[in-house]
Image (cartoon, rainbow, N blue to C red):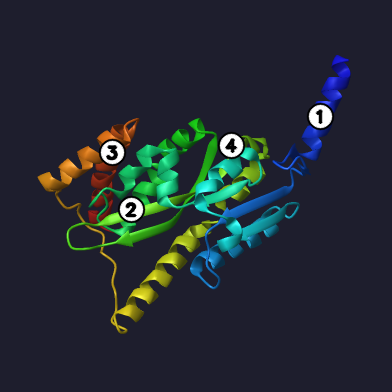
């Protein structure tokens, strides 16, 4: 009997896991849900994601549920947990609902420029946030839908996340984990395209005037009011928010030193 149970378990693993409707989905079928309006940069980014997966891991059958087909963001995390969706993009508010420490990234004036934000997000805080999402049963694949606004003296950066089911992701081969990890943001193309589209839209709204990004440079000193706003966000977020904030503070200094160093 024990041998029969083991054989049955192996057969189930080979065929895939049952979906919420009781059907069995093959482990090679991948459903992605994300907000992306027709013709938008986001849609282009997800189409490129699908193309990359098709080239790098052609054995997968990928289904993109974009825009209205993705359903409301509020239900996507549950769909990932249930196995109905393997990868989902969550906007900032939904992502923060899962990991409250994510609210720290939208603290006013936390980042001084897009380049500084990229450096800190990709090289400094990605791993700490991955650990936090892992504790909730998700694999944080990448940041998505970053929204940079720069009203006078109140720079704010908001970013959503691309999540995968942790169990599904960990069952992939090392090669396939790399594929799904890199397919969306390969060489920073997705982020660059999104920003270019936002810049074109801003310039169109400004009557064609050129809209420039804030240049990198030495980190501006935070006022006491800004520091107090940061402390309030850290207190509300709790958990490891202070630890990640301390990493950000050190990283801003490192980034400034790199930017000031003479080119070799």
Q: Is residue 73 above or below residue 13?
A: below
Q: Earlier in the sequence, mark 2 or mark 4?
A: 2
Q: Earlier in the sequence, mark 3 or mark 4?
A: 4
Q: Horizontally, is 62 left or right of 154 in the view? A: right
| Res. 10 mark | 1
User: On the image, numbered disc 2 is attached to which residue?
Assistant: 117
Label 3: how many Cα within 10 Å (few below 14, some 14–19, many 20+) = some
Distance from label 2 to label 4 (Cα)? Answer: 26 Å
Q: Residue lying at the far bottom in this picture: please name it.
A: 207
Q: Is residue 40 above or below residue 116?
A: below
Q: Quadrant of the C terminus?
A: bottom left
User: On the image, numbered disc 4 is attached to which residue?
Assistant: 166
Q: Quadrant of the N terminus?
A: top right
Q: Horizontally, is 218 left or right of 73 in the view? A: left
Distance from label 1 to label 3 (Cα)? Answer: 45 Å
Q: Earlier in the sequence, mark 2 or mark 3?
A: 2
Labels in figure, total? 4
Residue 231 seen by the camera: yes
| Res. 199 mark | none
């Amino acid at each position: 009997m024990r041998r029969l149970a083991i054989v049955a378990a192996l057969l189930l693993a080979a065929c895939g896991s049952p979906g919420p409707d009781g059907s069995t989905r093959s482990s090679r079928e991948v459903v992605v849900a994300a907000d992306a309006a027709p013709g938008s940069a986001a849609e282009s980014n997800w189409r490129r994601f699908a193309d990359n997966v098709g080239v790098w891991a052609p054995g997968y059958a990928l289904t993109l549920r974009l825009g209205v087909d993705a359903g409301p963001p509020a239900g996507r995390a549950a769909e990932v947990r249930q196995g109905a969706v393997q990868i989902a993009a969550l906007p900032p508010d939904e992502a923060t609902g899962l990991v409250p420490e994510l609210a720290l990234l939208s603290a006013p004036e936390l980042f001084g420029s897009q380049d500084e934000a990229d450096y800190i997000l990709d090289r400094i805080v990605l791993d700490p946030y991955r650990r936090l999402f892992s504790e909730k049963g998700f694999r944080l694949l990448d940041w998505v839908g970053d929204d940079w606004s720069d009203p006078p003296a109140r720079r704010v950066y908001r970013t959503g996340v691309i999540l995968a089911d942790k169990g599904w992701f960990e069952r992939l081969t090392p090669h396939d984990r790399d594929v799904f990890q890199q397919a969306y943001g390969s060489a920073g193309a997705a982020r660059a395209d999104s920003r270019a589209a936002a810049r074109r839209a801003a310039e169109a709204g400004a009557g064609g005037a050129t809209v420039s990004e804030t240049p990198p440079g030495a980190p501006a000193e935070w006022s006491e009011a800004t520091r107090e706003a940061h402390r309030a966000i850290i207190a509300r977020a709790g958990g490891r928010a202070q630890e990640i904030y301390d990493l950000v503070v050190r990283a801003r200094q490192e980034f400034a030193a790199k930017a000031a160093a003479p080119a070799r």
